[in-house]
Image (spheres, rainbow, N blue to C red):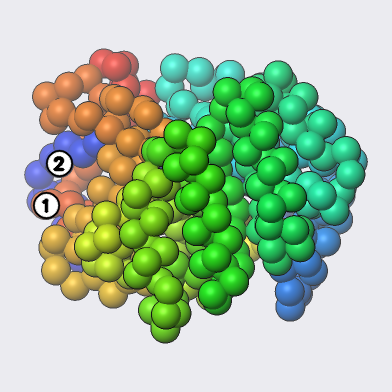
Amino acid sequence: MTDPTALPLLRTPGLVDAHIHPDKTSWGQRWQSRRSAATLIELIENDRATQAEYETSVEERAFALFSHALENGTMGMRAHVDVSSELGTRNVEGVRAAAERLSGDLTVQIVAFPQFGLLRNPGTLDVMASALDAGADLVGGIDPGGIEGDLHGHLDAIFGLADRAGRDLDIHLHDGGEGGLEQIREVARRTIGSGRQGRVTIGHAFALCDPALPSLGETLDLVADAGIWVATCALGPDPVPDLDLFERHGVRVAAGSDGVRDAWSPFGTGSMVDRAHLLAYRTGAMTDGELERAFRIASISGGEMMGLSSVAEWDARGGTHLEFAAENLAQLVVDRPAPLRVVRDGRVLR
Ligand SMILES: [Zn+2]
């Protein structure tokens, strides 16, 4: 590791966490031991139980995580927040209240996320609509096939709500295999059909990470035509995109934390420098260019996805930037220092 006292000052764009779950986090609380789970449904049940057991509010935990992320250079976040007939809109209200306390410093877009199913949890669509009036910005979705068992029914519901409310979409899709690709193609067809190019994101999209699938190439082309963003989290056991392949097909990628120290994972720091490192590591980055690409995905690309111009249209001479003690971006991604200064609109936040 390079001696930090001998390093020059490096200015970089701000960081963006393109996929995070701040309502579920235990950040700022005592250590939480986790139950094992073998399936997605078991993970979701553990999550439901854990949320019910928290003794501190969503606002308190989300604010602790937001504050830590901001100190580590995150300026924008796409926050997926649970809504259900059981929870109502209270998680959205808690996360919005936490975000308001950092308003102007950290830009938080909230997705009304049907974690516990939409068709299989009656009443959820109405709560999602209410959530859009209670601080949520986007309409979410979850595995229309694997969890909901009704591809068209689920997509009719969420695209319909997005149309009525005039909002963008950000859909969780874990399903793999050709079945996962068919769901992604249907999302792309509907995106193009409704003129929503560039305004739909798919989170995880594990099917797009499987090079053995025969229809992968044509699906990537359709995803590119639809301008769909893919949010990857480079999680330990899960597939990651082949970034060269995505680039060749013109598919845009942003990066996020996903769950930070919640029922889903004991890991995560909320630092997008750490996430850029993990993305570079999981995708086998070797050259400086590949390491720089991981940083760009965790910063400028996320800014483009969120429409956050101070990050997306970054200018080293501008008033929004991070300052690191680092030789260059490649060394920064490998050594993962925290920023020395976080500057937004000319204000020093750290
Ligand atoms: Zn997620």
User: Is residue 302 shown left or right of residue 88?
Assistant: left
User: Is residue 157 shown left or right of residue 101?
Assistant: right
How many numbered circles does the render carry? 2
What amino acid type should be assigned to the residue bearing mark 2? Answer: Leu
* The C terminus lies in quadrant: top left
| Residue 278 x %, y % | 38, 64
Residue 84 position (above or below residue 233) = above
The residue that mark 2 highlights is 10
* The N terminus lies in quadrant: bottom left
The quadrant in which residue 290 appears is bottom left
Tell whether label 2 touches label 1 (CB within 8 Å).
yes
Residue 182 position (above or below residue 272) = below
| Residue 323 x %, y % | 22, 36
Tell me the number on the disc at residue 327.
Answer: 1
The secondary structure type at the circle numbered 1 is loop
Residue 186 position (above or below residue 310) = below
The quadrant in which residue 178 appears is bottom right
Q: Is residue 65 visible?
A: no
Q: Residues within 10 Å of mark 1 (few under 14, many from 20)?
A: some
| Residue 142 x %, y % | 67, 53
Q: Residue at x 45, y 42 (%)?
A: 192
- Return the residue nearer the eye: 246 or 83: 246
What amino acid type should be assigned to the residue bearing mark 1? Answer: Glu
Residue sticking out furthest to the front:
193
Q: Residue at x 37, y 29 (%)?
A: 307
Residue 293 position (above or below residue 15) = below
Q: Is residue 53 visible?
A: yes
Q: Choose the circle earlier in sequence order: 1 or 2.
A: 2
